[in-house]
Amino acid sequence: MNLEKPNFNPEPPLQEQGEPVKSEKEIAWEQKRAEVDKITDKLGLGIDEKIKESVTAFQVHEFTTSQSCEGHTGEEEKHGASFPWVEIYTPEPKGWRESKGEKKKQLEREWTIENLKQRQKMMGYFAEFYQGRETPFDARLAFDRIGAFGGFRVQSFGAEMMKLLLPEEQIQKLELYRKEMDDFTKFLKDRHFSKE
């Protein structure tokens, strides 16, 4: 350091030749993806590989994901559903389990409102995503209510009907429903990188 001319705003170190400079949005996406890669359930199992990008996209857009599944058929179905889904459920409010009476009811109302706000936000994204989009009705993403306090799953409208299909039909629908979830994930990702 030159004591006669101190530089209190040094230039950032140059990146290695050929290595592109990452934007804040790219860094944020990569950090969130790294966090998603580390999430495990009570059995120590990580998030299914084919739904990780969706979970990342939901979390980057500040949705509180709580569970997910990439969709499984046949023998794989024993540890998951036959269709892809992502569950959004805000954590229980602090002190909810110990509270009683009116205090408990108030916490439950607040919890429900927080979940409904996320549902409302997701409805806005669905409206934008489906504007002018041609897709089979059963593949369209919809909400399936979860729990007592407004939580929900994002899944294809026809997902629950998979149980009625023959195995080869289930495989076709699984591919269709995965594509719809992947397309919505791409929409969210593009939205993340395009917003100012």
Image: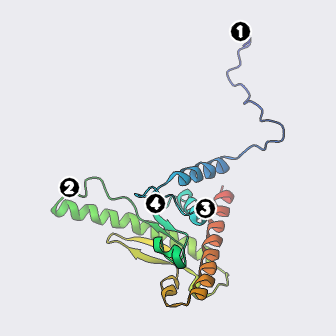
Q: Residues within 10 Å of mark 1 (few under 14, many from 20)?
A: few
Q: Vertically, is 88 above or below 171?
A: above
| Residue in the image at 72% along x and 13% along y | 1
Q: Are marks 1 and 3 in contact (CB under 8 Å)?
A: no
| Residue in the image at 25% along x and 58% along y | 96
> How far apart, in angstroms, are the residues tagged by discs 2 and 1?
62 Å
**Mark 3 or 2, nearer chain start:** 3
**Mark 3 or 4, nearer chain start:** 3
Foreground pick, 182 / 93: 182
Query: Which element carries disc 4, helix, strand or loop?
Result: loop
Q: Which residue is mark 4?
A: 64
- Screen quadrant of the C terminus: bottom right
37 lies left or right of 149: right
> How far apart, in angstroms, are the residues tagged by discs 3 and 4?
15 Å
Residue 3's label in the rendered image is 1
Residue 53's label in the rendered image is 3
From the top left corner, tell me how far across and down residue 77 is, in percent: 50, 75
| Residue in the image at 65% along x and 84% along y | 135
Q: Vertically, is 17 above or below 139?
A: above
Q: Which residue is mark 2?
A: 98
> How far apart, in angstroms, are the residues tagged by discs 4 and 1?
51 Å
Query: Which element carries disc 1, helix, strand or loop?
Result: loop
Figure label count: 4
Q: How is the image coloured?
A: rainbow
Give, as a three-letter code, the residue at label 3: Glu
